[in-house]
Image (spheres, rainbow, N blue to C red):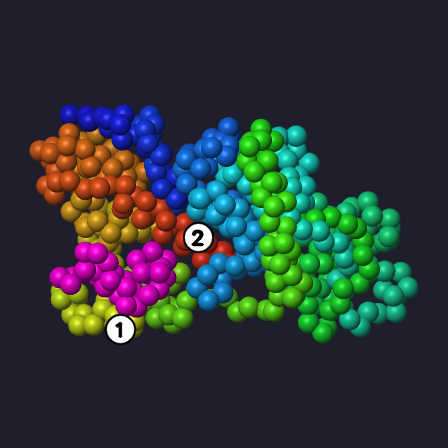
Amino acid sequence: MRLRVPALIGVCVMLAGLRSPAPPGPVVALTCPSPLDVPGVCIDPDRDLDDVVEEGVLRVGISADPTTWFLDRERFRGFEHDVLAGFARSLGVHLRLVPIPSTADRLRALEEGEVDLVAGRLARPDRESLAAIAVARSPWVLVEPALATSDAERHGPEQLLVVDQAWPRAAVQAAFPEAHVRALPDGTLLEEAVQLVRSGHGALVAREALVAPLLGTDLVVGSTVGHGGLHVAYRARSLALGDGLRSWLDAEQDAVDAARRRYLDERAPVAPSISRFDDLFQREAEQVGWSWPLLAAVAWQESRFRPHAVSPVGARGLMQIMPGTARDLGLSDPTEPASAVRAGARYLRQLDRRWQARIPDAQERVAFVLASYNAGIGHVEDAVELARLDGLGGDRWEEVAPWLLALAEPDWNQHPSVRYGYCRGTEPVAYVDAILGRWKAYEATLAVRPPAAPLW
């Protein structure tokens, strides 16, 4: 017999939660930190300020570049991060950053309604469908070796590297008509471009505010070759959102200026890390076969990295392990970080093994393991069974998540095929979405990805 999900619980899983009701449709899960796998986005190109407030989330497509945002002492920080987080707070919503390295892909995601705003080394986009607001001014400068050759001093550099699409082409070519311009791949980190200058591949055209903190004594900021700014883009028809951002920037100019001084004018180098427990996550993630930032994302979601956290139902420690589970795992002190992370990883490995036969794809299986860690494996198994009765394979999260939500309804939690009864499915579905989104953000800010294409 084929089942149908009732319209009441047809959902579209958003980046920070759920919106209901909506017609029954696929729920898309992020199963790896690919820049374009935006987890569970309801694409809505007409989305505006009231939709952001209703959902409770401001979604921002941003470059995966530490000059824009970075991890420092368990928190995301950075000029554009702090500005947009302040705007989100003023709306009473959460900020969700979606790392998308390619500028072209970020702008396309904005046009199609996958994100609300776009930032990250962004010049004013030359598209009729988009508008932009400058959040900081910064001249374009030439970055070159401190000990330039005599030829370079007389004639300028032979080769110019550009890393942003909107570089001041006319001004640069007028200043250096003989130079060969080499455009680096869209999405190249600014740090990677600076390293090419160090390696003798030419001079770099970049915004002074972003590149200055990356320079040592071997590189210098040379001549100014253009003027521009750092922009936040929005859809031209999202008038209320654009007006709201502009009004907030005008009202909070002192705070924006302070953030600019803190991150662009005076920023000291920061060694990226997720938490003071990184070494534990790195060691224990091997038990599960996961990347360690994913295990760290679980711990943050569970306890916000607080070793002595206790939930209302009695879960304790970094990994929020229940007393009965702790006994089964031989965990005597859940508040001791090393023991807690080891036990949490062991439990995740047990869950992973229980799903291996039914979900052979390791990346797809992550969502099932996370949902089981949150709600119990029995409820997830019930959702799989309902998905199969609906004629689906039941081995993809996008097929199973709607049925996990359905277990909150008597028509489904009392179905003869359901063994474990009622489940408030919004919690595990949102839990999975939040962890996968944070995992993606961690991977991006740690800059563990290789360049999208050879730079040279």
Give the class, few, some or many, for how many residues have Cα within 10 Å of label 2's Cα (few <14, many ≥20): many
Report which residue position mark 1 lands on. 336
**Mark 2 to mark 1: distance in Å?**
27 Å
Query: Amino acid type of disc 1?
Result: Glu
Can you see residue 159? no
The residue depicted at 15 percent of the width and 29 percent of the height is 411
Horizontal and vertical percent position of residue 207: 71, 55
Q: How many marks?
A: 2
Q: Which mark is residue 273?
A: none
Query: Amino acid type of disc 2?
Result: Lys
The residue depicted at 55 percent of the width and 36 percent of the height is 241
Horizontally, residue 404 falls left or right of residue 32, namely left
Q: Quadrant of the N terminus?
A: top left
Horizontal and vertical percent position of residue 61: 53, 45
Can you see residue 407? yes
Label 2 or label 1, whichever lies nearer to me, is 1
The residue depicted at 17 percent of the width and 65 percent of the height is 326
Horizontal and vertical percent position of residue 312: 21, 56
Q: Which residues are magenta?
A: 296-325
Q: Quadrant of residue 3?
A: top left
Report which residue position mark 2 lands on. 440
